[in-house]
Image (cartoon, rainbow, N blue to C red):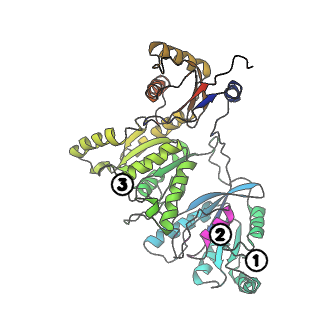
Amino acid sequence: MSDEVQYAGDGIWNEEADWALVDSGEDADGESFVPMPTLAVVGRPNVGKSTLVNRIIGRREAVVEDVPGVTRDRVSYEANWSGRKFMVQDTGGWEPDAKGLQQSVARQAELAMQTADAILLVVDAVVGATATDQAVARVLRKSKTPVILVANKVDNERGESDASALWSLGLGEPRPVSATHGRGTGDLLDDVLAVLPETPREDSGAVGGPRRVALVGKPNVGKSSLINKLSGDERAVVHDVAGTTVDPVDSLVELGGKTWRFVDTAGLRKRVSHASGAEFYASLRTKSSIDAAEVVILLIDASEPLTEQDQRVLSMIADAGRALVIAFNKWDLVDEDRRLQLEKEIDRELARVPWAQRVNISAKTGRAVQKLVPALETALESWDKRISTGPLNTWLKEVIAATPPPMRGGRLPRVKFATQAATRPPTFVLFTTGFLEAGYRRFLERRLREEFNFDGSPVRISVRVREKRDRGGR
């Protein structure tokens, strides 16, 4: 694999199959974006909210650990029940009298209540209704949003009597479930679909839905601060302890007249294999956030030397084939000597992504953060770009006539034609009579970028070598 371009799917040229690919006009990643209603899961700490979220979405995504307060932010996941899709929003524990970090966590739950289309209030049926549960119920009784009371940890019929005591909260019939074992969750989801609207109550109005931006980087590089600066609101918990963000946080942010969906992810530790518990799953989900995004902002601390962690995150982004903006944060701390050193580090350490958009910012002061919008738009425009087969082959013919490929085994491989097989990222297929050297493919990729402008997006090139046939064949 080249340092500058990813070559995908080299193989044999089968004319019928490959012409079908050309004629189909389908994108490998041509996913449509349909607005979905949101179900918020709220409650006090350690009642099993994240376990219930995992049960609803059918996979282990939300961080679950036997320690109160592991989930600190609002986190959204896609769910599907009986053919209907909706978003499930996990939240930090709600504490009315919380102070410090817990106060910020409580605000995340309150915001989820304000923006959701339906709400699940989760209560520990074994413990019963606490003062905190009663305080949450008082707030929710005034809400116009549908609320379903969930009595969790009801593992058998004997526990249902404990659940019935929760009628006292004034939120109607408690639904007894066991999030750990799945007991009663099917009936609960049927009830959810009965009150959940078909479409979200707030539609961004953007065609195809908000573009998805993953915000990644090593711990304490300023990701949550940047989210808060961009949104003008305390969307993510910011604390002077590295690793405050454990789960990804979905934030709809208005920038440049558009709505963007930002996901603030947990900082990646040195090695996933050396992580444990919540940290291990947070690292895995950071990769999932990159895979689910369209464009990635890689946040790098400009005041410190580039690290192995920065390189690992960059490799994850490149392997996922996502559009890329590199934001050098803490620029207010960079002096002239550091700038000169940083330029050398960029030339050496970021040589594999010379096409990435770069912006120098300060999330703390707000310096140049507005420049992220045009950088994101440029990267996405390149990522979505499709070049018609006619202009592509006219250009290719001229380039090859001026600079033919090197000979292999005494023979000159010929490029018969080319086509763009997919977008997101742009993927090109060259149909040839022989193998093309990696160096020549790098040359074609550079010229392709110069001619058609793919700034901010990776480009993938594959070579299909024509299959030799016997003269007596068809």
Residue 281 shows in the view: yes
- The residue stretch that appears in magenta: 42-70
User: Whole-Å distance between the Cαs marked 1 and 2?
Assistant: 18 Å
Question: How far apart are labels 3 and 2 at the CA level?
Answer: 36 Å
| Image spot of residue 256 (x, y percent) | 50, 41
The quadrant in which residue 220 appears is bottom left
Residue 155 occupies quadrant: bottom right
Residue at the image position 70 percent from the left and 82 percent from the top? 166
Which residue is found at the position 56% from the left and 61% from the top? Answer: 75
User: Which label sits in the foreground, 3 or 2?
Assistant: 2
Q: How crowded is mark 1: few (under 14 residues within 10 Å), some or many (20 or more)?
A: some
Which residue is at the front of the view, 408 or 315? Answer: 408
Badge 3: few (under 14), some or many (20 or more) residues near its Cα, within 10 Å?
some
Q: Residue furthest left?
A: 337
Could you tell me if residue 246 is visible in this image?
A: no
Quadrant (top left, top right, bottom left, bottom right) of the C terminus: top right
Secondary-structure class at tag 1? loop
Left or right placement of residue 417 versus residue 156 in this view: left
Residue 183, position as x, y percentages in the image: 73, 74
Label 1 sits on residue: 173
- By secondary structure, the bulk of the magenta-drawn segment is best described as loop
Residue 39 sits inside the magenta stretch:
no
Q: Mark 3 points at which residue?
A: 364
161 is higher (above) or lower (below) than 363 = below
- First in sequence: mark 1 vs mark 2: 2
CA gap between label 3 and label 1 equals 47 Å
**Marks 1 and 3: in contact by CB < 8 Å?**
no
Q: Residues within 10 Å of mark 2 (few under 14, many from 20)?
A: many
Name above or below for residue 333 compared with residue 452. below
For residue 52, the mark is: 2
Query: Answer yes or no: do the residues labelled 1 and 2 have beta carbons within 8 Å?
Result: no
